[in-house]
Image (cartoon, rainbow, N blue to C red):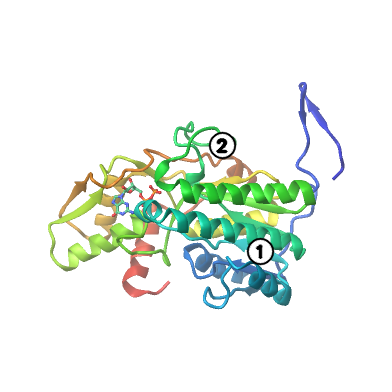
Amino acid sequence: SSGIIIRVSGVQISPSLPFKNMKKISLKNKKVFVAGHAGLVGQSLCKRLEKENCKILYINKKSLDLRDFNKTDKWLKLNKPDYIFIAAAHVGGILANSSFPADFIYDNLSIAINLIHLSHKNNIKKVLYLGSSCIYPKFAKQPINEQSLLTGPLEPTNEWYAIAKIAGLKLCKAYALQHKRNFISAMPTNLYGPGDNFDIKSGHVLPSLINKVHYAVKHNKKNVILWGTGKPKREFLFVDDLSEALVFLMKNYNEKEHINIGSGIEVSILNLAKTIAKVIGFKGKFIFDTSKPDGISRKFINSKKINSLGWKSKISLLKGIETTYRFYVTKKY
Ligand code: GDP
């Protein structure tokens, strides 16, 4: 760190050194570990990383449980990655989150603690940790900027997952502060794409509705059930857009504060359902099961910061849903 303090109109700002002046990094010929390579983000990220001419490292869940500190340590010592993307997480939709609170908090906390502490212990050059938009307070001002973190209570339907993800963000910052580590974190909005979990019970709304609407068309059903009122709004980001952003941040972003990654594409659940119906060719009706939770009414994030650095999402909701649906039917990506 240069130790310089900049004074702007009376406010003391300690610059986000030591990394700000560091040269933009290249992944070429470097060993890049994608933790969670088989998940929604991991699959897309590995595909995107092929363009970087790096050596992609990954390990199956069955061979290495990232919740196991000692085994994870051994694996890192043996494989010596230069860079790590932490895309491993126990994820699920609104019902899974509220049904398995212990699994969501324990699994995600252990993954974050192990990988971040062990990245420090094993001298990993740079780490990018992935948060989630449910980390922001339920009543945060929208579009939600990065500074809203921890300014109010969380949405109860996914607070277990949120607490673990907030801890992950703070771990990165703590190791950056105390040990001068270049551990950064990003906060993507609701993601979707090929490789998603299409299960009706445990999946998120978009893949679940693809599954339900496809089934309805195939079996000539007149109705598809939507959970809740259909009124909540969500912002959706296609996973290949996210992978672009992650590689961009790994190369260019060196600040201790987490950074939002949003698409700016916000729709109500009912309009999302209608778009999916259009793609699949469903002519029936949507009916509402209001015994199921709506969750948070809106979580639209402010992506000005990453946009001003030079990344923007490119894939429209319609195009993204078409690609995801094609994958659902053909299993080809
Ligand atoms: P959230 O963004 O964390 O709340 O998680 P989800 O993606 O699971 O849910 C988003 C919204 O979609 C909530 O308001 C749900 O009630 C609503 N929703 C409507 N139909 C479904 C469905 O079939 N599955 C899921 N997971 N959510 C649905």
The residue at which mark 1 appears reads as 84
Q: Residue 187 vs residue 76: left or right?
A: left
Q: Nearer the viewer, mark 1 or mark 2?
A: 2
| Residue found 53% across the figure and 47% down from its top | 163
Q: Disc number at residue 150?
A: 2
The 10 Å Cα crowd at callout 2, few under 14, some 14 to 19, many 20 or more, is few
Q: Position of residue 84 (x, y in %)?
A: 66, 64
Q: Nearest the camera: 33 or 26?
A: 33
Indicate whether 128 appears above or below 174: below
| Residue found 64% across the figure and 70% down from its top | 72
Q: Position of residue 324 (x, y in %)?
A: 37, 63
Q: Nearest the camera: 36 or 97?
A: 97
Q: Residue 176 vs residue 286: left or right?
A: right
Q: Position of residue 24 (x, y in %)?
A: 74, 55
The CA span between labels 1 and 2 is: 26 Å
Q: Are marks 1 and 2 in contact (CB under 8 Å)?
A: no
| Quarter of the image with the C terminus in it | bottom left
Q: Nearest the camera: 218 or 24?
A: 218
Determine which quarter of the picture holds residue 52: bottom right
Mark 1: secondary structure? strand
The 10 Å Cα crowd at callout 1, few under 14, some 14 to 19, many 20 or more, is many
| Residue found 41% across the figure and 42% down from its top | 156
Indicate whether 222 appears above or below 137: below
| Residue 105 visible to an observer of this rendering | yes
Indicate whether 127 appears above or below 59: above
Q: Residue 186 vs residue 251: left or right?
A: left
Q: Residue 169 vs residue 81: left or right?
A: left
| Quarter of the image with the N terminus in it | top right
Residue type (three-letter) at the residue carrying disc 1? Ile
